[in-house]
Image (cartoon, helix red, strand yellow):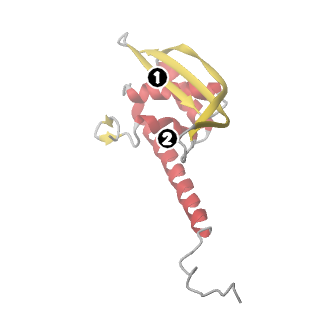
Amino acid sequence: MAGPETAGQPIPAPRHQWPRCLLAVDAREVRTAAEQFEQAFRIEDVQLPQSGLGLMKIRDGALGELYFPGEIPLATARVRMLAADQTWYEGAAQLMDDRASLARAIAVLDGVLANQLPGHETLIPLLQKGQNRLAAQAKERKALLETTRVNFSSLGHYEEDDHA
């Protein structure tokens, strides 16, 4: 599922990836984009923006037991927006980040995009920019991983005489 469509132009990423894409761009750009909608809609916090630490759980691959490798920064926000037609729309964000104000800005953008509110098409280039940065990071990581690859195929072809 690629997400909602925008006048023939699809939103470039599924909704669950929007926060990640928006975190990949400069926070000032995200806040500026959210501010334009603060002027257009009445926005209320359903849940006050918060930041703190979350405990990360991972399941052990061998025994299947849970263990806790540590804490991660976590910021959450949930907003509702009153449109000109007196309809309420909601948006939310949960980020691995410690900036509550950024979580609120992303929650506003989530609400605008998810409900395809007027002006949502202006956010598509911002999402695409984030996707492009994430793709570049993935490509760079893949290249770094390739440099550390070890070829074990030649092992075992040589006879070793340990008993001599």
Query: Is 73 or 128 nearer to us in this picture?
Result: 73
Which label is found at residue 117? none
Q: Residues within 10 Å of mark 1 (few under 14, many from 20)?
A: many
The spot of residue 60 in percent (x, y) is 57, 43
Query: Is 9 or 131 nearer to us in this picture?
Result: 131
Distance Cα–Cα, label 1 vs label 2: 17 Å
The spot of residue 80 in percent (x, y) is 47, 16
The spot of residue 140 in percent (x, y) is 58, 60
Amino acid under disc 1 = Gly
- Say whether residue 13 is visible: yes
Q: Secondary structure at mark 1?
A: strand
- Give the mark, 1 or 2, whose residue is nearer the N terminus: 1
Query: Is 139 or 156 nearer to us in this picture?
Result: 156
Q: In which quadrant of the rendered image does the N terminus lie?
A: top left
Q: Nearer the viewer, mark 1 or mark 2?
A: 1
Q: Is 161 left or right of 39, judged from the image as shown?
A: right
The spot of residue 83 in percent (x, y) is 40, 15
- Say whether residue 119 is visible: no
Q: Secondary structure at mark 2?
A: helix
Q: Name the residue at 56% across, 38% down.
A: 65
Query: Is 45 or 144 nearer to us in this picture?
Result: 144
The answer to which quarter of the image holds residue 31 is top right
- Give the residue furthest to the front: 163
Amino acid under disc 2 = Leu
Q: Residues within 10 Å of mark 2 (few under 14, many from 20)?
A: many
Q: Circle 2 sits on which residue?
A: 126
- Give the residue furthest to the bottom: 164
Q: Name the residue at 52% across, 27% down.
A: 93
Picture layout, residue 80 above or below residue 153: above
Q: Name the residue at 57% across, 54% down.
A: 137
Q: Circle 1 sits on which residue?
A: 91
Q: In which quadrant of the rendered image does the C terminus lie?
A: bottom right
